[in-house]
Image (cartoon, grey):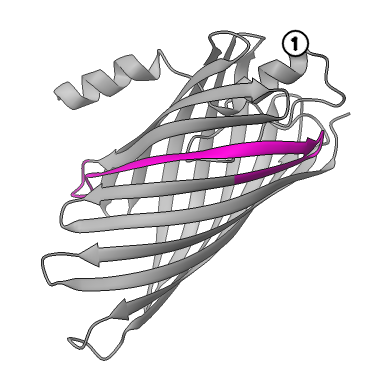
Amino acid sequence: MKNVVFLLVLFFSFSAFGQTLDSLQQLNKKQGAPLNSDRPGATYSANTVGKGAFMAQFGLDIGGHRLYKWDVSSSSVKAGVDLRYGIGENLEIGSFISGTSNNINTNLIEDTQRNNSSYSLNLRYTVLSNDVNSLGFLGDVAYGHDRQNNYMTYSAKALYAISLNNVIGLSSNLGYNYSEGTSWANYTLNLGFGLYDDFGFYVESFGNFGGGTDDLYIDGGIWYLIGPNVQLDMLFTKGFNNNVQDLIGAVGVTWRLIEPK
């Protein structure tokens, strides 16, 4: 209970990392509308892409994992694309498609190749957005396939954003998830630094709690805006999950194909 209260307090104190870049672009009147990308990191932007805008977010993750209880290690490769379209000024529809290949290094089992995929549809709505604060909500329905199993996951997230100054932004998402009779919550806490109009870095903590899924991740990375519509990023993630230790590296691209009207 103390953990939940602590997270709720932090939720109303922190904002989305993407807001650091967005505010810098607004204050410096950089050409084009703010990108409002969700990348990099696990924190969703509290702002939508804007009416009529169409954006694609690509990511490639390569990870190593070790299960100490059975002294088993594995490697994984995950690729995903997130498509976002602005229905209105404050409302957008999105779809996320991802696939993961896992290779388990052990002689204990014969089936050492584990692949899974996920397809989701989501709606995001921005309730409040100004130079300092943004508040939004996101609802998501996902279909997943893991080995021989198919499952549905339903999620709802609150997204809050605040820029402390022209350089520093703080962030948090707080979500509730339900899948196959099990429910759990998740959170993100993100501290971002926009050193220049087109470059910055961040550190972040995120994880899940409840429903037997307690875990913790720490990640950090950089982003570089090569133009008003294209952003590159790179990040590293370390997981601390019971007996499992994860180390993941990722690169990504955000590309706005159509600017908002």
Residue at 49 percent across and 35 percent down: it is 43
Which residue in the protein does label 1 denote? Answer: 27
Judged left or right of residue 260, residue 112 is left
Q: Residue at x 22, y 51 (%)?
A: 241
Compared with residue 109, is residue 101 higher up or lower down, i.e. above or below?
Answer: above
**Residue 177, percent across and down?**
36, 43
Residue 130 position in % (x across, y down):
66, 10
Magenta: predominant secondary structure element? strand
Residue 217 visible in rendering:
yes
Q: Indicate the quadrant where residue 80 lies.
A: bottom right
Report whether residue 175 is seen: no
Specify start and end residues of the magenta stretch as a single range: 210-233
Identify the element where label 1 is drawn. helix
Is 144 left or right of 8, judged from the image as shown?
right
Give 99 or 252, whichever is nearer the viewer: 252
Q: Count the marks: how many? A: 1
Q: Amino acid type of disc 1?
A: Leu
Between 143 and 233, the residue placed more toward the observer is 233
Residue 69 in the image: state x and y as whole percent: 10, 66
| Residue 235: % across, % down | 51, 46
Residue in the foreground of this view, choosing between 127 and 218 = 218
Residue shown at 83% from the left, 15% from the top? 29
